[in-house]
Image (cartoon, rainbow, N blue to C red):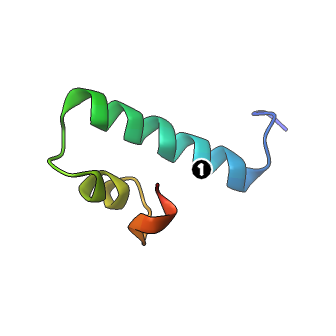
Amino acid sequence: DLTGYPPAEFIRRMRLNQAHNFLQNGSFTTVAEVAYAVGFKNVKYFS
């Protein structure tokens, strides 16, 4: 295992890292936009 994480956990961490970058850079207006941009189909699973 190259990452040290199971595949689903690795993907979740990558999405959250990208979301963190988007929020810091002000790339999107709302948190919902960030959630959808990083692949969350439902915003409630992002929070």
Query: The N terminus is located in which quarter?
Result: top right
Q: Position of residue 16 (x, y in %)?
A: 49, 42
Judge from the rendering whether residue 17 lies leftward or rightward of residue 9; answer left or right. left
Which residue is at the far bottom? 42
Residue plotted at (28% across, 51% down)? 31
- Answer with the quarter of the image where residue 20 lies: top left
Q: In this view, does 38 lie above or below 43?
A: above
Residue lying furthest top in this view?
24
Residue 4: x and y in percent read 81, 34
- The crowding category of the residue bearing disc 1, from other C-alpha atoms within 10 Å (few below 14, some 14 to 19, many at least 20), is some
How far across and down, in percent of the image, does residue 41 sit? 42, 71
Residue at the spot x=44%, y=63% of the render?
40
Residue 41 lies, with reference to residue 10, above or below; the image says below
Left or right of 31, for residue 4:
right
Left or right, 35 with respect to 17, comes to left
Q: What residue type is labelled 1?
A: Arg
Task: Point out residue 29 in the picture as x, y percentages from the top left corner.
Answer: 14, 48
User: For numbered disc 1, what is the local secondary structure?
Assistant: helix
Residue drawn 54% across and 41% down?
14
- Most foreground residue, 32 or 4: 32
Residue designated by label 1:
12
Name the residue rendered at 59%, 50% in the picture: 12
